Amino acid sequence: METAFPLFKFSYKKWKHAAINLFFTFTTIIVNFALAFLLLQISRWTQESHWGLLTFIDSIPLILYALAGLLGLDLISAYFIHWLEHKVRFMWRFHLIHHTDVHVDTTTANRHHPGESIFRFVFTSLAVFILGAPIWLIMLYQALSVVLSQFNHANISLPERVDKFLSLALVTPNMHHVHHHYVLPQTDTNYGNIFSVWDRIFGTFSYMKQEDIKYGIDTHLDASEHSKISKMLRIPFEPYRKPVGGKFSSPEK
């Protein structure tokens, strides 16, 4: 689809770009597989102990139970942690690697520093604990998350009416591309992963014309800082750079 209906026609070495993002995809897989047993144990304990918010609605029709569970998992393990990563400077240092990509496409979806992968695993575990999510629901959410994150990062151009209609419920490419605009305030909007409802409820929904979007992050636009793996792995441990528009204005300590 990216080839047939591209939003932007990038002039770059696509395979080199993909290789960088696939490296971070691999590190994400390693982190998640290494810690997966913890998630399974937490879920198993909640089921055996009849613990979690979902226990209060376990008698409703399965489809409604699944929808409620998916919404809850999306709120805590995706929207909330993503919002925190933009509000807590220590977490932003790791998350900004995701924003350094100046050629956003499907491979960008898993462009996460290993440190961020750990943050997200912790909040996924927290969501499972709070909700008391069964294994099948976790697997369903993870499967949908993979598909939707690939979709909303894709370099595709949907008709504006179609995109706006879909974005009433789901995070669409046009919606998420705004989040990847290189400067504030757009960078701090549209945190959703699967469902757009949380951005609408919490007032973080934003829209802008796709032709006005410029990808990347204003503090790291130099090619040497967004196209070298070794450099990106070190970014969280380097002196903090304040972006245009002010973010974490307190002095570095």
Image (spheres, rainbow, N blue to C red):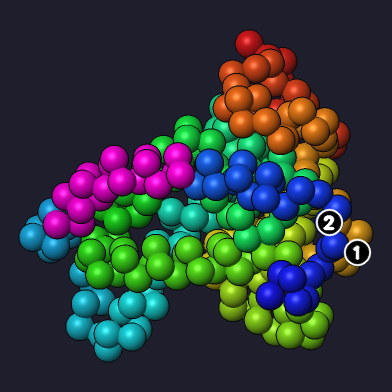
Relative side of 51 to 83, left or right: left
Q: Is residue 39 above or below residue 174?
A: above
Which residue is outermost to the left? 48
> Which is more toward the observer, 92 or 52?
92
Q: Is residue 104 above or below residue 217?
A: below
Q: Is residue 245 visible?
A: yes
Q: Quadrant of the N terminus?
A: bottom right
Relative side of 35 to 182, left or right: left
Residue designated by label 1:
211
Q: Is residue 32 magenta?
A: yes
Q: Quadrant of residue 252?
A: top right
Instruction: Count up the numbered dots.
Output: 2
Q: Position of residue 158 (x, y in %)?
A: 76, 78
Label 1 residue SS: helix
Q: Amino acid at mark 1?
A: Glu
How many angstroms separate mark 2 from mark 1 (CA)? 13 Å
Q: Is residue 164 visible?
A: no
Tell whether label 1 touches label 2 (CB within 8 Å): no
Residue count near mark 1 (Cα–Cα under 10 Å), binned few <14, some 14–19, many ≥20: few
Q: Position of residue 70 (x, y in %)?
A: 40, 70
Which residue is outermost to the bottom? 61
Q: Earlier in the sequence, mark 2 or mark 1?
A: 2
Picture residue at 60% right of the left edge, 25% below the top: 230
Q: Which mark is residue 10?
A: 2
Q: Main secondary structure of the magenta part?
A: helix
Magenta stretch: give its range.
Answer: 26-44
